[in-house]
């Protein structure tokens, strides 16, 4: 109930803690109404100032002038109601009104200028410097296009003042000025201190990252642009006042070929379509959205459903038409108000920008909205390019490439599949194409070759293909598909008898001269080799058994670039015999690709069986066959294997050279399978092994995109998980959080192994902790703890993450939850001891409790320290190592700092002396900790106890001691503190 002044004040304080947005704004409006019922002018002033802040941060700039008029009138009548803070806040809000007036085209230009005059006069009368006034003059000039250079010079040449925008925001405005002039290099140089963290505020560097996206791309700094998008949009998402920046992120997606990501951003922020409180920001948002929709429409995707205003349904073309009309009208209103064409010109320039890349820029994210399929080319375009036009021509080309084992066949079959399964497809009456059921059989067989299929789906596709082949009177091909299905390793029965029958049947068809019976025989023999592989190597990891249904003719057995178990050498006699029969038949039919695939299958078996030298010999034999047969695209797998072998042997340069050679061949021959993705993973691992984190980031980003293109959602999610881990290792926590938050939401995340899910969430939790997002960090730590709770191995992981969760909850000021998490962590520690984690948790909780509650938290804080001491004693009794350096010294040091925070400096001094003595007894390993305790003791004496001379003497002796033991930098720090205390006192 808001029926007392104290209740309203408490509600104002509580609302001030809420994030900006519609909820806070509505409450602020209600609190103004509540304050008006009392004859308390100071209360009303605070409520009105808070309401104005809510409007400013909720894109409701239209309403600012009215609220400010009430504030100005109240200050005029009751100046004593405005304390120092309210006076400053009111003066600051003069600038907000200036911004609001220029952002609304209904406000006449003369009215905007009159307000600038009022701002100037008020600042002059109040004794404020006029630099902020000249800043507002520049912003208006930049919007209208009149006298921009003169206004910029008048503003930028003046020194900053008390009411200037923060330095980060001013640097942003200066950088944007040079972007408009076409000087991207100068703009980026101005922005660099903001990006480096030298200057920041609540909005920066996030807003600058959005405005720097295009300059970074034009400067060739794609990696920096990618990072700016990941981290900048993570901040902007869902913020009503970030409409302009969200529009820039949508534009970035349109210009980099990431239209699906752009559609996802529109869906995330569709509430912006209904927000009209800041017309200028709305125009920027609409322009970015229009760029994306125009791009979709121009590439033949106008009928794609897109997210528009809430409660509506639109296609891209429909929403484009609506946004174009509104955007053009809004720009025209600004130009009519301003008397220039500057706003419309800037909008037209943005809409005329063309994509900057021939291929999409990999972002390290998977868009939630599937990428639209490429639109069919127009007849004239197809004829000019010399590409197949009709389904019959496409199928003829795909069959030809298929028989040559060319990787481009994969993309062609996918295109055919999309056309044939589309609504309204009419199968041509073409004898060369064959009946519809034959094409359906071929497409089902091609679907079975998709990388990463679960066994049940693989068998289903092969069975469907076999059924259709039988209906099309192609019995040999039907037998081949059934043989491949029989060889799937997860089946419970030994497939030997079934495969014997299929081989007899297909040999009879060969004798009878049936169509493609020879091919089918090779397929059956290949299936027998695959079955032998699993019989010989039962329990071993065959890497990607989703490749094992290969018909011996169409796919390479490429290595996946992952680490593998390495058992001792194992017998593969059955497989060797099966491969010999396959190779013999391939030679009889003069089918070198089938021989090559046989060599690669045997090489893989040798690799899994621990016979690395034999595997390498077999790969070299495959390489010779490939060169003799002039099938260069099959070298992709060979070089991938050789690169993996080289990396195992520590030959990183050779491994990288081989991997890049394979990638170049894959690109040359249009290989869109999973092979290039796995090679890119290998390249990333090579860079990691050399400590080249930036290069590893690029490689994992590319690998994830390649896995996406190959339809390998699980592998793509894994690559993105590794990407997030590398970003975190490189201290790029905002990038890591953006990537890992997206991975966590992917459908494929649920299919990852629990340990992999836990690692991704753990890295995310630690990244969020580093970003100061403690509540979100705690949620992730708790998720990891839940995942680890049921593990039979590595049970101490549960203890570790439960401890981290407790600390994160305390930092988020969630004390009841933190206490429960602490109890959970201690229970886990008793079952699966991790003394380091438990002690560290308790020490941190002690300090956090003291810091948050002061004297009232003394007993609880000290109780945490007592618990830590008991865990140390128990660990020593049980022979468990506590690797926290000098534990005794650490406990005394933490107790001292805790006592100081709860207002007991004398007791703290006693404890810190004990810490210093314990560190001294620890020998050389305790020297730095001892010096730090001495430094803190001096601060306690000099600042809290008034014993400056004792502190100075302590520091002089400690500095001399540090120089004696070879720690000159530590000595310098102590000397600096000595000088500071002497000046201070």
Image: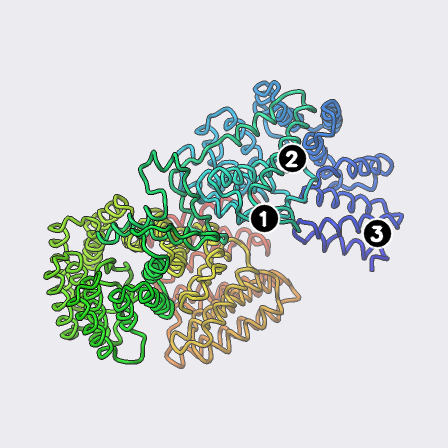
Q: Marks 3/1: CA distance?
A: 38 Å
Quarter of the rendering occupied by the N terminus: bottom right
Q: Nearer the viewer, mark 3 or mark 1?
A: 1
- Residue 361: % across, % down: 40, 43
Which comes sooner in the sequence, label 3 or label 1?
Answer: 3
Q: Residue at x 73, y 53 (%)?
A: 13
Mark 3: secondary structure:
helix
Asked whether residue 909 appears in the rendered view, the answer is no
Mark 1: secondary structure:
loop
- Vertical relation: 116 (above or below) 673: above
Mark 3 Cα-neighbour bin, 10 Å: few <14, some 14–19, many ≥20: many
Q: Residue at x 65, y 27 (%)?
A: 332
Q: Nearer the viewer, residue 324 or 817?
A: 324
Is 197 positioned to the left or the right of 543 in the image? right
Which comes sooner in the sequence, label 1 or label 2?
Answer: 1
Mark 2: secondary structure:
helix
- Vertical relation: 923 (above or below) 29: below
- Vertical relation: 835 (above or below) 388: below
The residue beneath circle 2 is 326
CB contact under 8 Å: marks 3 and 1:
no
Q: How is the image coloured?
A: rainbow
Quarter of the rendering occupied by the C terminus: top right
The residue beneath circle 1 is 307
The residue beneath circle 3 is 34
Mark 2 Cα-neighbour bin, 10 Å: few <14, some 14–19, many ≥20: some
Is 323 positioned to the left or the right of 889 in the image? right
Q: Marks 1/2: CA distance?
A: 17 Å
Q: Residue at x 62, y 67 (%)?
A: 815
């Amino acid at each position: 109930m808001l029926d007392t002044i104290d209740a309203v004040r408490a509600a104002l304080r509580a609302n001030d803690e809420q994030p900006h947005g519609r909820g806070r704004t509505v409450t602020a409006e209600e609190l103004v109404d509540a304050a008006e019922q009392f004859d308390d002018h100071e209360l009303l002033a605070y409520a009105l100032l808070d309401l104005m802040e809510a409007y400013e941060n909720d894109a409701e700039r239209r309403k600012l002038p009215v609220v400010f008029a009430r504030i100005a009138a109240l200050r005029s009548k009751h100046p004593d109601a405005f304390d120092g803070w309210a006076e400053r806040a009111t003066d600051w809000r003069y600038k907000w009104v200036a911004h609001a007036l220029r952002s609304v085209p209904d406000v006449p230009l003369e009215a905007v200028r009159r307000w600038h005059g009022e701002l100037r006069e008020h600042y002059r009368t109040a004794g404020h410097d006029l630099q902020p006034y000249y800043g507002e003059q520049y912003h208006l000039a930049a919007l209208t296009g009149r006298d921009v250079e003169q206004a910029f010079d008048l503003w930028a040449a003046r020194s900053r003042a008390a009411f200037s925008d923060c330095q980060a925001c001013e640097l942003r405005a200066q950088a944007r000025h040079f972007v408009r002039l076409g000087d991207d290099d100068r703009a980026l140089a101005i922005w660099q201190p903001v990006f480096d963290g030298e200057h920041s505020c609540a909005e920066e560097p996030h807003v600058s990252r959005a405005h720097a996206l295009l300059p970074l791309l034009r400067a060739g700094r794609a990696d920096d642009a990618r990072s700016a998008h990941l981290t900048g949009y993570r901040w902007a998402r869902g913020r009503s006042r970030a409409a302009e920046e969200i529009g820039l992120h949508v534009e970035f997606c349109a210009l980099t070929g990431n239209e699906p990501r752009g559609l996802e951003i529109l869906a995330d922020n569709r509430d912006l379509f209904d927000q009209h409180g800041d017309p200028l920001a709305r125009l920027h948002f609409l322009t970015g959205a229009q760029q994306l929709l125009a791009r979709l429409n121009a590439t033949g995707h106008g009928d794609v459903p897109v997210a528009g205003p809430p409660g509506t349904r639109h296609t891209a073309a429909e929403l484009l038409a609506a946004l174009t009309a509104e955007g053009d009208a809004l720009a025209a209103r600004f130009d009519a108000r301003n008397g220039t064409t500057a706003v419309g010109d800037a909008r037209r320039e943005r809409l005329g920008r063309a994509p900057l890349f021939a291929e999409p820029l990999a972002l390290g994210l998977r868009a939630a909205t599937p990428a639209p399929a490429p639109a069919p080319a127009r007849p004239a375009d197809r004829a000019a390019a010399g590409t197949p036009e009709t389904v019959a021509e496409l199928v003829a080309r795909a069959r030809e490439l298929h028989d040559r084992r060319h990787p481009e066949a994969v993309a062609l079959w996918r295109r055919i599949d999309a056309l044939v399964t589309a609504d309204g497809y009419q199968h041509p009456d073409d004898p060369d194409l064959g009946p519809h059921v034959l094409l359906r059989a071929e497409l089902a067989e091609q679907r079975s070759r998709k990388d990463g299929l679960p066994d049940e789906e693989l068998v289903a596709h092969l069975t469907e293909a076999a059924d259709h082949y039988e209906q099309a009177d192609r019995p040999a091909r039907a037998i081949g598909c059934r043989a491949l299905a029989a060889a799937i390793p997860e089946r419970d029965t030994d497939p030997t008898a079934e495969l014997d029958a299929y081989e007899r049947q297909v040999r009879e068809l060969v004798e009878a001269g049936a169509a493609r019976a020879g091919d089918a025989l090779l397929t059956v023999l290949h299936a027998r080799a695959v079955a032998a592989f699993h019989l010989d190597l039962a329990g071993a990891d065959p890497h990607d058994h989703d490749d094992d249904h290969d018909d011996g003719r169409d796919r390479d057995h490429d290595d996946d670039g992952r680490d593998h178990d390495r058992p001792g050498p194992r017998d593969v006699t059955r497989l060797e015999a099966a491969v010999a029969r396959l190779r013999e038949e391939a030679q009889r039919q003069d089918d070198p690709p089938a021989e090559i695939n046989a060599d690669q299958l045997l090489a893989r078996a040798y690799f899994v069986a621990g016979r690395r030298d034999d595997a390498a010999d077999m790969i070299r034999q495959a390489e010779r066959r490939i060169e003799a047969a002039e099938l260069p695209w099959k070298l992709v797998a060979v070089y991938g294997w050789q690169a993996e072998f080289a990396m195992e042997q520590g030959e990183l340069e050779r491994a990288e050279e081989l991997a890049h050679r394979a990638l170049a061949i894959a690109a040359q021959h249009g290989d869109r399978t999973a092979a290039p993705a796995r090679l890119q993973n290998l390249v990333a691992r090579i860079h990691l092994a050399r400590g080249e984190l930036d290069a590893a980031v690029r490689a994992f980003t590319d690998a994830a995109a390649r896995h996406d293109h190959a339809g390998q959602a699980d592998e793509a999610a894994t690559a993105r998980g590794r990407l997030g881990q590398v970003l975190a290792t490189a201290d790029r926590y905002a990038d890591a959080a953006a990537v890992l938050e997206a991975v966590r939401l992917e459908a494929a995340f649920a299919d990852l192994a629990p340990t992999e899910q836990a690692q991704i969430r753990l890295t995310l939790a630690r990244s969020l902790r580093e970003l100061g997002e403690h509540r979100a960090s705690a949620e992730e730590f708790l998720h990891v703890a839940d995942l680890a709770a049921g593990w039979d191995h590595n049970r101490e992981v549960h203890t570790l993450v439960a401890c981290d969760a407790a600390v994160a909850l305390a930092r988020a000021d969630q004390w009841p939850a933190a206490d429960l998490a602490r109890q959970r962590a201690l229970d886990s520690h008793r079952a699966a001891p991790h003394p380091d984690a438990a002690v560290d948790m308790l020490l941190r909780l002690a300090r956090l409790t003291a810091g948050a509650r002061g004297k009232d938290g003394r007993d609880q804080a000290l109780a945490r320290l007592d618990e830590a001491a008991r865990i140390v004693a128990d660990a020593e009794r049980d022979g468990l190592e506590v690797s926290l350096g000098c534990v005794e010294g650490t406990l005394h040091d933490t107790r001292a700092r805790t006592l100081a925070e709860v207002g007991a400096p004398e007791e703290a001094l006693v404890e810190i002396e004990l810490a210093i003595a314990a560190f001294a007894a620890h020998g050389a390993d305790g020297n730095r900790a001892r010096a730090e305790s001495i430094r803190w003791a001096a601060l306690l004496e000099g600042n809290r106890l008034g014993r400056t001379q004792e502190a100075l003497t302590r520091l002089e002796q400690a500095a001399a001691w540090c120089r004696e033991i070879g720690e000159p930098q530590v000595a310098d720090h102590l000397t600096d503190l000595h000088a500071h205390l002497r000046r201070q006192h």
